[in-house]
């Protein structure tokens, strides 16, 4: 793992270890999805990294809410917005039926105010689509989020469309590689690029998330701290386009394991894809705990 500093930003290069004993394990587990699986794991404190299809592009689905959250908190640090700032929500701001939104369901007529903090929490806790699109607009739009994430050296990640646009086109143009996702997760765990308080808030919201309990968390010991963000597409014609989970796991000795697993075009269904993610996370956990 190498790094260099440029304009005050530390950029990390992920070096995949092709000889890791985890690779054949991951490959065996991935076969169960009957689709395409990209996975990468990193022991953050050492930079030791391994994975399968780790440099290939995968649709993010709601994982794209993580770079949006990072961009929003960077703008908070800059003083451009405030966590307590109120945003007026109109009925026209709601994502359509078929996309999850607790705040839409709670205020079906719109015309109410909600704080940036509440939007951020709802986006990360229950993957609220309306909260996501409001925050994406506040962040300056997809291009602004991508530009900021790339400025951190995380080039293998792109935010191109909002939740509404994704639904309208029936296509997810937001993508990331497992390796690129690890870069962002490591940057977050090491305390950059956002302030300590906002970083802690982000990781807390991610740890409290109620989505995907059978994914990274599924086979880990009860009580394990997992700060994560899921992404899901649903199924059509017997194919599940995306079942994803990315996050930071706190190991028993206090070290941290970053995990990014993307499953696409699975013919085995979401439940099997979730178990594939859980098995990969458990294999990485066992490998690290034994060392």
Image (spheres, grey):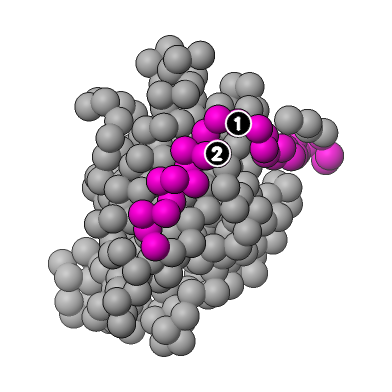
Q: Which residues are magenta?
A: 5-34
Quadrant, the N terminus: top right
Which residue is disc 1 drawn over? 20
**Mark 2 packing: few (<14 Cα in 10 Å), some, or many (20+)?**
some
Marks 2/1: CA–CA distance:
6 Å
- Vertical position of residue 77 compared to residue 265: above or below: above
Q: Residue 249, position in %: x, y?
A: 42, 31
Q: Is residue 43 above or below residue 194?
A: above
Q: Residue at x 25, y 78 (%)?
A: 98
- Where is residue 117 drawn, in percent x and y? 37, 49
**Residue 276 visible (yes or no):** yes
In the depicted structure, whether residue 171 falls above or below residue 102 = below
Q: Are marks 2 and 1 in contact (CB under 8 Å)?
A: yes
The image shows a total of numbered marks equal to 2
Q: Say what secondary structure mark 1 lies in.
A: loop
Q: Residue at x 59, y 22 (%)?
A: 45
Q: Residue at x 26, y 26 (%)?
A: 221
């Amino acid at each position: 793992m190498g790094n260099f500093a440029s304009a005050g930003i530390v950029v990390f290069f992920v070096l995949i270890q092709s000889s890791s004993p985890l690779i054949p394990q991951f490959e065996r587990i991935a076969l169960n999805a009957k689709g395409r699986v990209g996975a990468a794991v990193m022991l953050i404190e050492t930079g030791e990294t391994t994975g399968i299809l780790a440099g290939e592009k995968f649709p993010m689905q709601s994982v794209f809410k993580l770079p949006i959250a990072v961009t929003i908190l960077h703008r908070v640090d800059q003083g451009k917005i405030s966590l307590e700032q109120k945003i007026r929500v109109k009925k026209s701001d709601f994502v359509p039926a078929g996309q999850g939104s607790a705040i839409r369901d709670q205020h079906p007529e719109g015309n109410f105010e909600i704080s940036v903090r509440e939007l951020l929490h709802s986006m990360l806790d229950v993957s609220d689509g309306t909260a996501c699109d409001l925050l994406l607009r506040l962040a300056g739009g997809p291009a602004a989020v991508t530009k900021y994430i790339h400025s951190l050296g995380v080039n293998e990640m792109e935010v191109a469309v909002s939740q509404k646009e994704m639904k309208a086109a029936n296509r997810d143009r937001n993508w990331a590689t497992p390796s690129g996702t690890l870069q962002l997760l490591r940057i977050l765990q090491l305390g950059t690029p956002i302030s300590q308080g906002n970083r802690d808030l982000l990781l807390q919201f991610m740890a409290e998330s109620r989505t995907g309990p059978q994914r990274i968390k599924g086979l880990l010991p009860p009580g394990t701290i997992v700060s994560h963000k899921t992404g899901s597409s649903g199924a059509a014609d017997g194919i599940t386009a995306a079942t994803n989970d990315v996050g930071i796991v706190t190991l028993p000795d206090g070290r941290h394991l970053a995990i990014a697993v993307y499953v696409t075009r699975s013919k085995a269904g979401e439940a099997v894809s979730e178990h594939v993610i859980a098995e990969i996370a458990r294999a990485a956990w066992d490998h690290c705990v034994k060392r």
